[in-house]
Image: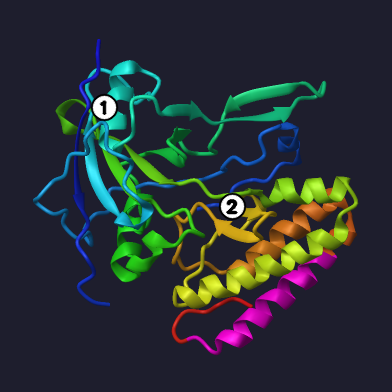
């Protein structure tokens, strides 16, 4: 049976004024040759009581139009799917999805697959994305997007906030985050509706961050004797994190681990992905969480890796002192 996929997208209301367990890091993932991929986690609920309404005026993106630029802001819409699960490889789904995104018919959509080394050191491939339902990369006319499918659970406990609602809240509070090239904040979110308009999943569309995941950078530098370069990278990450906290009122990312930090060695740009818990109240700050991750993987690399934390903290304190004291939320240094 063919899928019927319709999209309506409306701009989110502008602000009117002024909430998971960490992803497990396993060293076996180093068997993967594509180290620039994403590793996300997600939790969902149907909490929608604090949402701003989507504008009544909807926008349909023509199939030949160039994908809207990142500065277009943040939009939430619906994809109506019947008789078939969401699979962008299915022709009927693919054509409608590309039209909703304003991508060309020749755009490439590739599923992200992870891998690990089994007991016999053989590479085993699997559908990647941690607790997500799938991740795809879309490439079209020089632009790269990440499509992340997240399961929607309308029976989730009330204290569990769906990622989609976290993003909507963040956009209301700090709309500039939608245009920040250093964070993977969605530019569009589609609610996937099945028979009877039952909401089964959400599809998050975001820019692909440049560079490689920090866990891959650490491995590469360690194997090639680039310890000094690695110390400088950790210092840059510390600076970036302090600036991130200062830019967003001390809000914590809440899962700052090597799997969620991207680093472009050519430009020295640091980026963050997996913002689905940003602003949640946790017992540990971002700085403490990051230190915990590095302390864990140092058991594989050796205690020498812990010295990188000193450089990280120095970078953080340097940037934080330049920015001055913050009001409100804690920074975590």
State the residue in front, 246 or 109: 109
Name the residue carrying label 1: 96
Q: Is residue 120 above or below residue 141?
A: above
The residue under the point 38% across, 43% down is 205
How did the renderer colour the structure?
Answer: rainbow
Question: Of discs 2 and 1, which sits in the foreground?
Answer: 1
Q: Nearer the viewer, residue 17 or 157?
A: 17
Pointer 2: what residue? 260
Q: Quadrant of residue 114?
A: top right
Asked whether, in this view, residue 267 is left or right of residue 251, the answer is right
- Disc 2 and disc 1: Cα gap in Å? 30 Å
As helix, strand or loop, the secondary structure at mark 1 comes to helix
Please give the range of residues in magenta. 307-326
- Name the residue: 37% across, 60% down: 178
**From the viewer's perspective, is 301 left or right of 45?**
right
For disc 2, the neighbor class at 10 Å (few under 14, some 14 to 19, many from 20) is many
Location of residue 300 in the rendering, given as x and y in whole percent from the top left corner: 84, 48
Coordinates of residue 179 in the picture (x, y in percent): 39, 61
Q: Inspect this view and state whether residue 19 appears.
A: no
For residue 178, say whether it is visible: yes
């Amino acid at each position: 049976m063919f899928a019927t996929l319709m999209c309506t997208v409306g701009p989110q209301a502008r602000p009117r004024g002024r909430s998971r367990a960490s992803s497990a890091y396993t060293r076996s993932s180093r068997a993967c040759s594509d180290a620039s991929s994403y590793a996300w986690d997600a939790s969902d609920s149907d909490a929608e009581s604090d949402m701003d309404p989507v504008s009544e005026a909807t926008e349909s993106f023509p199939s030949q139009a160039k994908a809207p630029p990142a500065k277009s802001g943040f939009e939430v819409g619906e994809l109506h799917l019947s008789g078939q699960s969401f699979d962008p490889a299915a022709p009927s789904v693919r054509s409608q999805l590309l039209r909703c995104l304003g991508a060309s018919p020749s755009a490439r959509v590739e599923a992200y697959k992870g891998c690990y080394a089994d007991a016999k050191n053989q590479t085993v491939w699997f559908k990647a994305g941690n607790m997500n339902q799938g991740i795809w990369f879309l490439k079209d006319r020089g632009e790269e997007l990440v499509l992340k499918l997240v399961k929607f659970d309308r029976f989730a406990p009330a204290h569990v906030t769906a990622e989609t609602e976290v993003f909507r809240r963040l956009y209301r509070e700090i709309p500039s985050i939608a245009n920040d090239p250093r964070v993977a904040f969605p530019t569009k979110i589609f609610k996937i509706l099945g028979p009877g308009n039952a909401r089964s999943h959400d599809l998050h569309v975001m820019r692909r961050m440049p560079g490689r995941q920090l866990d891959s950078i650490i491995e590469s530098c360690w194997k090639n004797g680039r310890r000094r370069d690695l110390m400088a990278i950790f210092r840059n990450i510390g600076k970036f994190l302090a600036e991130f906290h200062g830019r967003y009122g001390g809000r914590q990312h809440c899962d700052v681990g090597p799997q969620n930090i991207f680093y472009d060695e050519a430009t020295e740009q640091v980026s963050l992905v997996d913002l689905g818990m940003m602003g949640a109240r946790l017992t540990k700050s971002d700085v403490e969480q990051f230190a915990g991750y590095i302390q864990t993987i140092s058991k594989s690399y050796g205690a020498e890796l812990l010295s990188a934390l000193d450089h990280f903290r120095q970078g953080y304190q340097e940037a934080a002192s330049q920015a001055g004291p913050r009001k409100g939320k804690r920074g975590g240094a």
